[in-house]
Amino acid sequence: MSVTRFIGRALLASIFIKNGLDHLQNPDPIVRAARGAEVPEPELAVKVNSGVMVGAGALMAAGLMPRAASLALATSLIPTTVIGHPFWDKQGKERQQQQAQFLKNLALFGALLIVSKE
């Protein structure tokens, strides 16, 4: 594996590791969002999703099973994006902020798909 590819994967993984750890340490806002979206067992769903982010992020950062790790992260990003950034329900500045986060997550999703095909 090239140094550039290793650094790129580690940088991509870093946001998932950080957010996963943050959500494990302070799950309440995420659990509230999951509950509002009527996710069954929201506490468990947040723990599982956060664990996937940390575990798969660490694997990808280390260059271990990057295809599987990137697909796991891409899968976890779908509910995170739809539940966490519903810009279509917002107005004004909040809508713009949520839309920017939604689009950022789409860009991350695209990067993960590229990694999954390497």
Image (tube, rainbow, N blue to C red):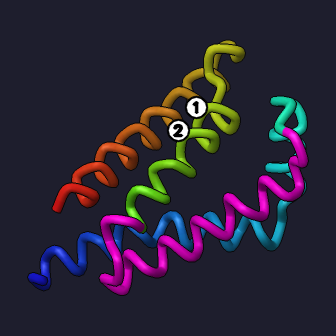
Where residue 20 sits in the image (x, y, percent)? 64, 67
- Kindly identify the residue that appears in the image at 78 percent across and 64 percent down: 47
- Residue at the (45%, 72%) spot, across then down: 14
**116 is within the stretch colored magenta:** no
> Which corner quadrant of the image does residue 28 belong to?
bottom right
Q: Give how far across and how far down residue 106 sits, in percent.
A: 41, 37
Question: Left or right: 41 with respect to 75?
Answer: right
* Mark closer to the observer (1, 2): 2
Q: Going by the image, does 27 lie left or right of 88?
A: right
> Is disc 2 surrounded by few (<14), some (14 to 19) or many (20+) residues within 10 Å?
some
Give the residue number, with chain letter if any, for mark 1.
97
Q: Which SS class for mark 2?
A: helix
Q: Are marks 1 and 2 in contact (CB under 8 Å)?
A: yes
Secondary structure beneath label 1: helix
- Quadrant in the picture for the N terminus: bottom left
Q: Position of residue 67 (x, y in %)?
A: 31, 65
Disc marking residue 101? 2
Q: Amino acid at mark 1?
A: Gln
The stretch of residues the image draws in magenta is 40-68
